[in-house]
Amino acid sequence: MITELKVEGMSCGHCKMSVEKALKSVRGVEKVEVFLREGKAVVEGSAPADQLIAAVQEEGYSASVRQ
């Protein structure tokens, strides 16, 4: 399953790495790709979207499922 998130508040490479690390820490995540310029994250695995969003929010960024 692939979940695409809209992530707001990332402005640098450190932000990108923080979001990647947070998403990788969620149980069920197999692969994470964060795109700084596009403000999005693509997550592969079985983790529920609400847990992915919560992990990103804990790092101080806003996230929602990309429509």
Image: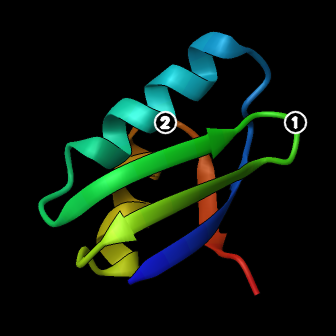
Q: Indicate the quadrant where residue 61 lies.
A: top right
Where does residue 19 sit, x and y in percent of width and height? 49, 36
Residue found at x 39% / y 66%: 44
Disc 1 element: loop
- Nearer to us: label 1 or label 2: 1
**Seen in the image, is 12 located left or right of residue 14?**
right
Amino acid type for the residue under numbered disc 1:
Arg
- Is 17 rendered above or below residue 52? above
Q: Indicate the quadrant where residue 22 lies.
A: top left
Real-space Cα separation, disc 1 to disc 2, in angstroms: 14 Å
Q: Quadrant of the C terminus?
A: bottom right
**Seen in the image, is 59 located left or right of residue 63?**
left
Residue neighbourhood size for the residue with mark 1, other residues' Cα within 10 Å, grouped as few (<14), some (14–19), many (≥20): few
- Is 7 rendered above or below residue 48? above
Residue matched to label 1: 37
Amino acid type for the residue under numbered disc 2:
Val
Residue matched to label 2: 19
Residue found at x 60% / y 60%: 63
Q: Earlier in the sequence, mark 1 or mark 2?
A: 2
